[in-house]
Image (tube, grey):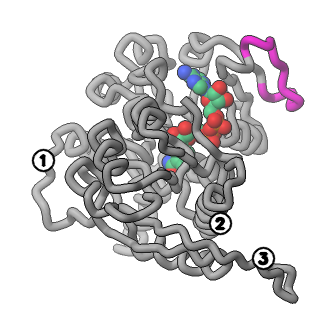
Amino acid sequence: MKILHSGRRCYNATMKVAFFSTRTYDRQFFNRINVDYNHDITFLEAPLSGLTASLARGFDAVCVFVNDHVDQETIQALASGGVKVIALRCAGFNNVDLKSATEQNMKVVRVPAYSPHAVAEHAVALILTLNRKTHKAYNRVREGNFALDGLVGFDLYQRIVGVIGMGRIGAVFAEIMTGFGCRVLAYDPLQIDQDSKSANPRIEFCELNRIYEQSDIISLHCPLTPESKHMINEEVILKMKPGVVLINTSRGPIIDTPAVIRGLKQGIIGALGIDVYEQEEELFFADHSSDVLLDDDIARLLTFPNVLITGHQAFFTENALREIAHVTLENLRKIEAGEEPTNLVRT
Ligand code: NAI
């Protein structure tokens, strides 16, 4: 390791890493940060799955993203090709079969927090856009239409915002919403057990049912687990305040999409903002503008005027991309140097 005049550390890491599902921006940020690490990186556009795992033969590690399929079949194929490390360049690890990774003696590392602000701020962007309809106003005004019909919104001030999952992102989101003068009702299994109180008097921890029944806006910030899968379902939607704004920047399957479509048709859900979608791996991170849309649920969602969908871009800020690249390359360096990686995912 060299320390440059600027104080920057430069390593001579030599780990051979196959990066799957990469796009131009991944290459740009990782190449920039890798100047300090010197890992031997090969960028691939293909997603990782049992079919493509053979591309990593002879590599020490693979680096994967949210929609790569790191299931048992993939892990066995990676292990037989000599791969010893799975480095996630994201926080969530629901797409990795951790049991199989442990059985194959493979280390799994991730980037637990890169910028909670990026995701929290995007959730706020979805709320403001849906409420004040700035996306429609923008198009209207460009066509010379200055009419206000259909653009009416509501003041966020004094509204009740329900936050499900008060980890890093949920906590930042809750604080931002109190800045608008909202009252926040928050649920998190960890916080409830300890009967927690927030330092911010506008944030109150409570049971989930109260969030469903009293919130004007509900924002999901919990990870996808067997417990959280389809937690927003028919039964829960019927408990919600008519006109509730539902926001999901967490993981698609937390929402039961057909149930939410019914909730929108019944007018219980007044607006829906999603950055994640249950079947997103078939669609997101690629240009399908010339293809026939085969997914009927997303096709139906796109017909609603009160639905806003973004393609898993909540994390997509310069700050977050820089941090993701830095932490991922540092995780790999530590493993290569025999140090205990801080960001190890344990079974
Ligand atoms: P975190 O681990 O700091 O917080 C998650 C919180 O959710 C924890 O406090 C945990 O106790 C709580 N939780 C777990 N199960 C729950 C349940 N069933 N109901 C309510 N709360 C529950 O994670 P962080 O960094 O805040 O990220 C949250 C999620 O956001 C990630 O798991 C990931 O799925 C998603 N995410 C989305 C991104 C995007 O670009 N759209 C980018 C980064 C993360």
Crowd around label 1: few <14 · some 14–19 · many ≥20 (10 Å): few
Q: Is residue 130 left or right of residue 260?
A: right
Q: Identify the residue at image location x=47%, y=31%.
A: 224
Q: Identify the residue at image location x=68%, y=34%.
A: 167
Q: Nearer the viewer, residue 204 or 64?
A: 64
Amino acid at pointer 1: Leu
Q: Earlier in the sequence, mark 3 or mark 1?
A: 3
Q: CA distance from mark 3 to mark 1?
A: 49 Å
The N terminus is located in which quarter? Answer: bottom right
Q: Is mark 1 within 8 Å of ligand 1?
A: no
Residue receiving disc 3? 9
Amino acid at pointer 2: His
Percent x, y of residue 268: 40, 22
Residue receiving disc 2? 326
Tell me the SS state at disc 3: strand
Which mark, residue 294? 1
Q: Which residues are magenta?
A: 192-203
